[in-house]
Image (cartoon, rainbow, N blue to C red):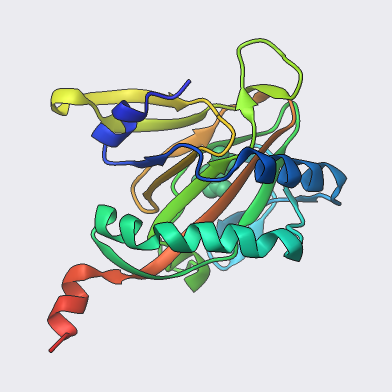
Amino acid sequence: MVDAELLRCAGLFVMRDFLPVDLCARLRDEAARSRLHKAGIFRGEKILMDERIRRTEGACLPETLQSAIDERFQTIMPDLGRHFDHVLTGRQPAQLLAYQRGSFFRPHQDNSGSSGLPPDVTDRLVSAVVFLGRQTRLPEPGSYCGGALTFFRLRGPGGTNRVRTEVWGEEGLLVAFPATGTIHEVRPVTHGPRYSLVTWFTGGDRSEQDAGGT
Ligand SMILES: O=C(O)CCC(=O)C(=O)O
Ligand SMILES: [Fe+2]
């Protein structure tokens, strides 16, 4: 369940079927087979494992699937840049994430701009999340429950301020948002696993480029 219009109205970039269902299924299979490692959070230069804030695991993204994913992200880069008023020139390697029952990621922004963070974080301009599975209210074969990607204080229709906006996963759905200032969380998964791909686009402001151009 995603009200794409609502998210668009709040300035997010939404694309259904960004990845084809067969590619989503292959990625889920790979993640299920892969050795998983605990994913951390940045505190200054350090990566901290704090399971009160984030309980998520990372899986290996096989090279055989990497090029298909890169190609898809590459195609939307100009549109994303226009949408968020940036000149996007690069992208950080996509991460394949696995959330088992009980996993979550508490409210955070992907680039808080705090001093002392490594360039990997401060370079992030636009965050993109791709859902590889489907969220349902009750367990169904192949679905997950809980785990809504929840945004806080998004602008609503008519300039209202929505307290919370939930995005329920659909296979292949992409949601992109500014890496700085967009507070979001992954609600606890109650039936899993939930799989997603995340990546960050980098580059510069349009205005900076215009000022520098001749
Ligand atoms: O898995 C998701 O849906 C989002 C993950 C996330 O917010 C992050 O990795 O920063
Ligand atoms: Fe995030």
Q: Position of residue 1 (x, y in %)?
A: 48, 20
User: Seen in the image, is 19 located left or right of residue 159?
Assistant: right
Residue at figure coordinates x 61%, y 17% from the top left: 136
User: Seen in the image, is 77 located left or right of residue 17?
Assistant: left
Residue 56 in view in this figure: no
Q: Is 174 in front, or is 212?
A: 174
Res. 213 image quadrant: bottom left
Taking the image in four quarters, ligand 1 sits in the one at top right
Residue at figure coordinates x 36%, y 29% from the top left: 4
Res. 7 image quadrant: top left
Q: Position of residue 49 (x, y in %)?
A: 70, 51
Q: Position of residue 50 (x, y in %)?
A: 67, 45
Q: Position of residue 129 (x, y in %)?
A: 51, 45
User: Seen in the image, is 128 located left or right of residue 197?
Assistant: left
Residue 137 in view in this figure: yes
Outermost residue on the bottom side: it is 214
Q: Is 210 in front, or is 63?
A: 63
Q: Is 103 in front, or is 170?
A: 170
Residue at figure coordinates x 13%, y 80% from the top left: 211
User: Seen in the image, is 143 located left or right of residue 171?
Assistant: right
Residue at figure coordinates x 44%, y 60% from the top left: 75
Residue 120 against residue 105 in the figure, above or below? below
Residue 24 against residue 141 in the figure, above or below? below
Residue 180 against residue 16 in the figure, above or below? below
Q: How many marks?
A: 0
Quarter containing the C terminus: bottom left
Residue 177 against residue 191 in the figure, above or below? below
